[in-house]
Image (spheres, rainbow, N blue to C red):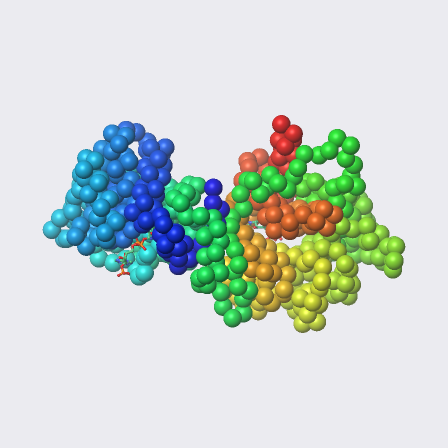
Amino acid sequence: MSVRILSADQMRWADMTTTEAGISGFELMDRAGRAVADAVLDYMPDFGRVVIVIGPGNNGGDGFAAARYLRSRRIPVTLVMLVPLDTLGGDTLMHAELAREAGAKLRDASSDRCFAELNRWLLRAVMVVDAMFGTGLTRPLSGRLAKAVAQINQADRPVLSIDIASGLNADSGEVMGDAVKADFTLPVAAYKWGYWMGVGPEFSGRLLPASAIGVEDETLCRAWAAVPDPSVSKGSTVLRSACFIHSDMIGQAWPKRHRLSHKGNFGRVWIFGGSAGFTGAPRLASLGALAAGAGLVSVVCPDDVYPVVASGSLETMVHSQSSGAWMREGDGLIDQADAIVAGPGWGCAQTTLLARLLDVDRPLLLDADALNMIAADAALQSRVSERDSLTVLTPHPGEAARLLSCTVDDIQSDRKKAVLKLCKRYACWVVLKGNETLIASPQGDVMLNPSGSPQLAVAGSGDVLAGMLGRQLAVCYRNDTDVGMMLGAGVGLHGEAGEQNGWYLAGELAGMVAGLRQGIERKHGD
Ligand SMILES: NC(=O)C1=CN([C@@H]2O[C@H](COP(=O)(O)OP(=O)(O)OC[C@H]3O[C@@H](n4cnc5c(N)ncnc54)[C@H](OP(=O)(O)O)[C@@H]3O)[C@@H](O)[C@H]2O)[C@@H](O)CC1
Ligand SMILES: Nc1ncnc2c1ncn2[C@@H]1O[C@H](COP(=O)(O)OP(=O)(O)O)[C@@H](O)[C@H]1O
Ligand SMILES: [K+]
């Protein structure tokens, strides 16, 4: 299954490259149509008529091809055309003819006189296939085409959209005039950003696995370099690759534990955080690190909150900042750290200590107040971008806006652009949190996390994530594991835990994470 995410132009380039390599447009359409028919057969609620609404481009061609495959399974099919047949392209016309020969009814709804045909057939459908527009939508829908979308949405039938819900911009997830509210979207060959950007998730319904139509993975990967991503601007890192986080990636991060393993094998995470009024944050981060499987977790907190943090932490070692033992030159305890997390609940009066941590040659995750201090201090900003060791920033949209001196709306209106800008500005890994968290490497490799839930919008869930990712970085440091895979798996598991029922406190979220993680580790033994 492909997990690549492409822009509309990149997809067009990949389609074209594939046809130049010898697979005809007709054949690609045919394979897409077969995948659509299979998906319809999987999800149609009952045996009955399938109505396929055909638009002016190749998306409609996929619809005609699907009709033939559905007919071969004796499904009654009506093809309702929103443009005259004789205006369609050659491959599409050939598929239209084959669909007719296979017994599909072709009905014209391309003029005001016969537009009522659309509603007449929609009312007789058990399922509707939206083959109006795919990646070729260039302007807002208007007139009859917009009316057709409204009628499909009003018909209250299950809708499967081919490639993308018609009317949704495949890159930005914006609605162009109006858009079909799909129950299912079947991506053709690869995923498009529009499913997740903007209001895309509200229109895409359930995303099915991308159909393999013969566009090679290598071609999809070359498309990023061949065609610039629309989000790339002067101030941002160039997007080099894009995929979404999937269960295989999550599985790889937690191999089976060796029978003779001990806590020293599973990474030591050091967490710097806590301040008066915010004593829970470093504790939640430490729970996150332990839940993700860290062997040893230490917390360093300001002296005034030391008794509170220490007394609430059974499983972690707690040091006060002034005790000094943890950061002696040469043999200080900090030398034992495999990764450092700084920021949860720390307050903004820790710039001196933060500057010292930036000098420690260990993977460093900067969260919460560490990010706020950096946003307000040009000297710290330079030190972040000049660091040689692995550095990860984990801002939520508010922190991201401070780091880029812009508004939250600027961040949220193009999150992909924002994450690439943060990479460029700070020359490090960035995890831009929120619905559909984005991770980007300094080289421009972007991962999108499709899991998660608004359940996660609760105080402390980000602290749990910071600790979890601290553990992931510790494993990278010890075992030289792929950083993108480890961060992606951490974010993915956090999202999956957030989707579970049975928790509402961030501490309980850590418990959910631990349960899922242990399940993955044990599964590797089966
Ligand atoms: N390429 C391939 O080999 C393969 C492609 N595949 C499939 O094809 C889809 C992409 O096909 P596509 O490029 O033809 O785009 P699609 O969205 O169907 O229609 C574009 C047409 O709509 C028109 N148009 C645009 N906006 C409009 C508006 N607001 N109102 C009215 N008209 C508007 C536009 O006209 P123009 O802008 O030129 O005036 C053009 O005529 C892709 O998503 C996948 O499903 C697969 O079969 C695999 C192989
Ligand atoms: N609506 C949402 N959908 C999915 N995930 C969300 C949503 N809201 C928040 N989250 C996730 O919850 C976490 C919240 O982190 P953050 O804002 O730093 O919270 P806190 O500072 O309280 O710990 C992040 O991982 C974020 O991606
Ligand atoms: K469509």
- Image quarter of the C terminus: top right
Quadrant of the rendered image containing residue 154: top left
Q: Is residue 349 visible?
A: no
The location of residue 65, given as percent across then percent down, is 28, 42
Q: Where residue 284 appears, x then y in whole percent?
A: 69, 46
Q: Residue at x 53, y 59 (%)?
A: 240
Going by the image, does 169 lie left or right of 425?
left
Vertical comparison of 200 with 36: above or below: below
Tell me the residue at 29%/51% (across/down). 58
Q: Is 472 displayed left or right of 250 in the figure?
A: right
Instruction: Tell me which residue sits at (76%, 46%) in the image.
Output: 268
Please state the horizontal and vertical placement of residue 37, each as a whole percent of the image. 32, 37
Q: Is residue 488 visible?
A: yes
Q: How many marks?
A: 0
Outermost residue on the left side: it is 113
Q: Residue furthest front?
A: 22
Q: Tell whether 461 sits left or right of 348.
A: left
Residue in view at x 36 percent, y 39 percent:
35
Q: Nearer the viewer, residue 524 or 498?
A: 524
Comparing 189 with 155, the one in front is: 189
**Residue 85 or 161: which is nearer the viewer?**
85
**Percent position (x, y) of residue 40?**
33, 36
**Closer to the camera in the image, 144 or 525:** 525
Q: Quick check: which quadrant has ligand 1? A: bottom left
